[in-house]
Image: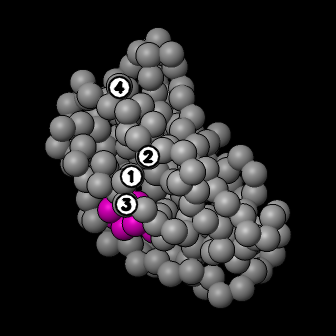
Amino acid sequence: MLPVFPIAYFGSVRYFQDLALFKQVLFENSDHLPKQTFRNRMVILGSQGSQVLTMPLEKPSGSKTATKDVLVSYQQNWPLIHWRALKTSYASAPYFEHYASDIEKILFTKHRFLVDFDSAITQFISNTYQLGLDFSFTDNYESSYEKDFRVLDYEDLEMNRDYNQVLFTEKQFNPRVSILDLLFCEGPVGRMVII
């Protein structure tokens, strides 16, 4: 039985540490999208501390909309807002310039569906860190699985390893931030934090 994970919008480092434990995973796309989830938001570090960046969504069937049917909303120019926030927070990070154009391209590619957007992100991180991750999606909703990672709150889990962050007002390591923090701060060496 394959492990089942939620999809994530530039998920936390811990999220990718768990994904890297497996070569094949299933992403849940048949559930109803919960509110306030990392499926459409990421946490970055800024001069004012942790900052949450949220991708606006449209749910055609309201709260009963399956994750696979959730649309990304472009009524406001949120990709530009997120990109500016990333530049402000990480422009001085050692590897920002190296990955900036890739991240900018991902942010400004207009995906219609949330699962497509998050899949593109996961594929990029898997390729960048050579995780060799093979993923597909659930066909229907099951209340539980043998290896079920859907219930974990990745914004509250501690990481397996620390790394050097670009710290602002927070003077200690913050384990809840997006994988982009690791990417911009550690570059390719970040693979050793994940695996």
Separation of residues labelled 3 and 4 (CA atoms)? 21 Å
Nearer to us of marks 3 and 4 is 3
**Hey, what amino acid is under mark 4?**
Thr
Kind of residue indicated by mark 3: Thr
x 68%, y 54%: residue: 152
Residue that carries the numbered disc 1 in the rendered image: 107
User: SS of the residue at dot 4?
Assistant: helix
Disc nearer the start of the sequence (1/4): 4
Q: What is the C-alpha distance between the residues marked 1 and 3?
A: 6 Å
Left or right of 15, for residue 165: left
The answer to whether the residue labelled 2 contacts the one labelled 1, judged by CB atoms less than 8 Å apart, is yes
Q: Is residue 44 something one can see in this rendering?
A: yes
Residue 193 in the image, given as x and y percentages of width and height:
35, 46
Secondary element at tag 3: loop
- Front residue of this view, candidates 85 and 129: 85
Labels 4, 2: front one: 2
Q: Which residue is mark 3?
A: 109
Range shown magenta: 119-126
Residue at 25% over, 53% down: 102
Secondary-structure class at tag 2: helix
Above or below for 181 versus 40: above
**Which dot marks residue 88?**
4
